[in-house]
């Protein structure tokens, strides 16, 4: 009744080819954040980052990132732990519009 369609090759969920050899920011499960140059990936979103730097978190508030970084160099990121991938170029951080100012409270 219904035609059976089978995939002949494994396709990735994301097309990261346009970000190869460009700086990307990767956030992992647990909150760690690493910025580096994307050198490679596979269909499981395992990533190879070069010249990578980890943004350190505030020791008093583990959910808040600081301006401090540490050099990691060449790293392989396991795809099951990756929760966000974004290009560095063309993005900027903005204030959270959902947090009410303390003056209003």
Image: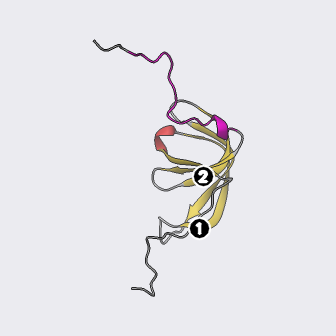
Specify the quadrant of the image occupied by residue 22: top right
Q: Residue furthest front?
A: 1
Please indicate, yes or no, whether residue 39 appears anywhere in the rendered image.
no
Task: Tell me if mark 1 has few (under 14), some (14-19) or many (20+) residues whose alpha carbon lies within 10 angstroms of its own.
Answer: few
Give 87 or 60, whichever is nearer the viewer.
87
Q: Earlier in the sequence, mark 1 or mark 2?
A: 2
Specify the quadrant of the image occupied by residue 91: bottom right
> Whole-percent x and y of residue 18?
66, 38
Name the secondary structure under disc 1.
strand
Give 86 or 56, whichever is nearer the viewer.
86
Query: Contact (CB < 8 A) between labels 1 and 2?
Result: no
- Vertical relation: 70 (above or below) 45: below
- Vertical relation: 22 (above or below) 32: above
Q: What residue would you read off at disc 2?
A: 34
Name the secondary structure under disc 2.
strand
Q: Is residue 7 magenta?
A: yes
Please indicate, yes or no, whether residue 17 appears anywhere in the rendered image.
yes
> Whole-percent x and y of residue 2?
31, 15
Give 9 or 80, whichever is nearer the viewer.
9
Task: Tell me if mark 2 has few (under 14), some (14-19) or many (20+) residues whose alpha carbon lies within 10 angstroms of its own.
Answer: many
Q: Is residue 95 magenta?
A: no
Q: Looking at the magenta stretch, what is its main secondary structure?
A: loop
Residue at point 65%, 61% (across, down)? 69
Any mark on residue 66, and which? 1
Q: With 89 as the anchor, is 30 left or right in this view?
A: left
Q: With 98 as the anchor, is 87 left or right in this view?
A: right
Q: Which residues are magenta?
A: 5-20
């Amino acid at each position: 009744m219904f035609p059976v369609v089978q995939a002949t090759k494994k396709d990735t969920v994301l097309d990261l080819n346009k970000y190869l050899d460009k700086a990307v920011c990767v956030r992992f499960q647990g909150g760690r954040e690493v910025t580096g140059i994307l050198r490679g990936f596979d269909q499981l979103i395992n990533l190879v980052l070069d010249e990578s730097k980890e943004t350190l978190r505030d020791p008093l508030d583990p959910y808040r990132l600081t301006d401090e970084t540490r050099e990691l160099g060449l790293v392989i990121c396991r795809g099951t732990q990756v929760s966000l991938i974004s290009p560095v170029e063309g993005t900027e951080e903005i204030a959270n519009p959902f947090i009410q100012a303390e003056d209003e409270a």
